[in-house]
Amino acid sequence: MSWASRDTGVFRDDSMLAAAIERAERLRPGALRALSHSREVPVRPRVGRVPTVSVVIPCFNYGRFLAESVGSAVAQEGVEVEVIVVDDASTDDSATIAARLAGEHPSVRLVRNETNQGHVVTFNNGLAVASGEFLVRLDADDLLTPGSLARATALFDAHPNVGLVYGHPKHFATPQPPTPNTDVRGWTVWSGHDWFAHACRRGVNVITTPEAVLRMSVVAEVGGLDTRLKYAQDMEMWLRAATVADVGHVNGADQALHREHPNSMSETDGSGFEADIVERRAVFDYLFENAAKTFVDADDLHLLARKALAGQALRQICRAYERGRTAREPVEWYETFAAEVYPDYQDLSQWRALRRRRRAGTTGARLWLPFQVTAALRRLRGDLEYTRWARTGV
C-alpha cells in the first residue's frame, strides 16, 4: 500500500496513485492560468439598496490600534455596518477602548471572552452573533479602505452565485496608513472550482484577510473558521467557500490596508517556512477530507496541491545551496517533507535542480555563477508573479 493510501484513504494501490499522478500532470500551469472567468465593467449599486455587513474584529492586546480599525468600518458609505469587537481577555486597555467606541457608535458592539481563547475561537464567537447579509473578518490592527464594502457588495448583488469577494490589500509598516487607491478598474468572476483548482496548483494563500468579504448565506452553509488550524484558518475558509460558490475580485482598488509590525502573528507565531508549509498541507488535507471531496476531480486536485507543496520544499533546499546556508537550514527536513507529501517527488523539476546543485557543491560560501544566474531568474519570475497577483488577485 502506498504512503498516499495510508495518509488519505484515497488511493487503494500504487497503480491508482500512478494514474492520479498522470491526470494531475495534465493540469498544466498554462491551462490553469487561463481560468474560466468573466471580466466586466462594474455596475453601480442598486438605487435604494443598502446592504448590511457584519464586521467582526477579534482583539487581543491591540488597544492602540482598535479605534482606527473600528473607525475604518463605521465610516463605510453605501452600506449598513454592524461592528462586533470580540475582546479575547486582553490585558491592556482593549476592552475599555471597545466599550467607549460602542458608547459612541450605535453600530458597534462589544463581546468579551472570559478567558483567552485564541484568535480562531474569538472570531467564531463574533460570527455567532453577527446578523448581516455579508461578513468581514477585520483584525484589530488592520483597516478597511473608504468605500471598500460598497464596492464588494455591488459585485455580490450583480452576481448572486458569488460567495466570496476580495481585492488588493495594501501592506504598510509606517506609523500613518498610506492613502489607498479607490478607483475600480473592473471586476473578475471565476467559477468556484476553477479558482480552487488554481489555488491547488500554486499551493499558497492569495488573500491576506481584511480585503475578503463573504456572503453570509455561504458562511451558514460551510461554517466558520476551522479550530484545528493555528495560522492558515483564513485560507481554508476562503477555499471552503469556493466549494459551494463562485469567487469575485474587485480590480484596481485597494480594498484594505494590512498593517505589518513586529508583534503581528505573521511576524511571530505564524512566521517561518516550516510552520507555514505544514499548516498549508493541513489546509488542503482537511479540505479534501470534507468540503472539497464533492469535486469530481477531487483526487487529482489534492495531488496537485501536494505536488506544489513538495516543489516548494525542494526549492527551499536549492536556495540554501545558492546562499551557502545548508549547514544552517533544515534541508533534511525539507526533503523528508517533500517525500511525505508527494511520493514521486524525485520526478519534479525542483528535484532535478537540487541534484545539479548537490553535484556541483559549493565554492566558498555560494554556488558557482550558473546557479546564481538561475537564482536571479527565479527571483525575477517571482517578481512577475507578484505583479500579476497584485493586478488580478491570482
Image (cartoon, rainbow, N blue to C red):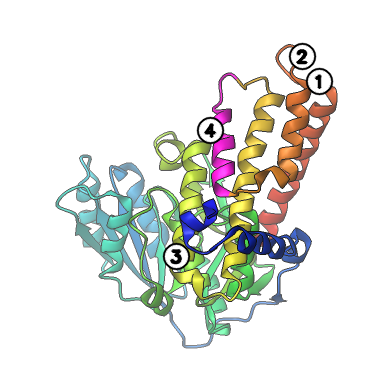
Name which residue type carries label 3: Glu
Mark 3–mark 4 Cα distance, whole angstroms, equals 25 Å
Q: Nearer the viewer, residue 343 or 152?
A: 343
Instruction: Confirm whether residue 245 shows in the render.
Output: yes
Disc nearest the viewer among 1 and 4: 4
Query: Tag 2: residue type?
Result: Thr
Q: What residue would you read off at disc 1? A: 368
Going by the numbered disc 1, the residue's amino acid type is: Trp
Q: Vertically, is 160 above or below 366?
A: below
Disc 2 and disc 1 in contact, CB within 8 angstroms = yes
| Nearer to us: label 1 or label 3 | 3
Whether residue 253 is visible to the viewer of this picture, yes or no, is: no
SS class, disc 2 = loop
Find the magenta span and give its range.
Answer: 327-341
Contact? badges 1 and 4 (CB < 8 Å): no
Q: Which residue is mark 2?
A: 363
> Can residue 339 be found in the magenta stretch?
yes
Which of marks 4 and 1 precedes in the sequence? 4
What is the distance, in whole Å, between disc 2 and disc 4 at their CAs?
A: 24 Å
Is residue 251 shown above or below 359? Answer: below
Q: Nearer the viewer, residue 298 or 148?
A: 298
Q: Which badge, 3 or 2, is on the more N-terminal residue?
A: 3
Q: N-terminal of the two: label 1 or label 3? A: 3
Of 261 and 367, the residue lying toward us:
367
> Around disc 3, counting alpha carbons within 10 Å, would you say few (fewer than 14), some (14 to 19), or many (20 or more)?
some
| Mark 3 or 4, nearer chain start | 3
Which mark identifies residue 333?
A: 4
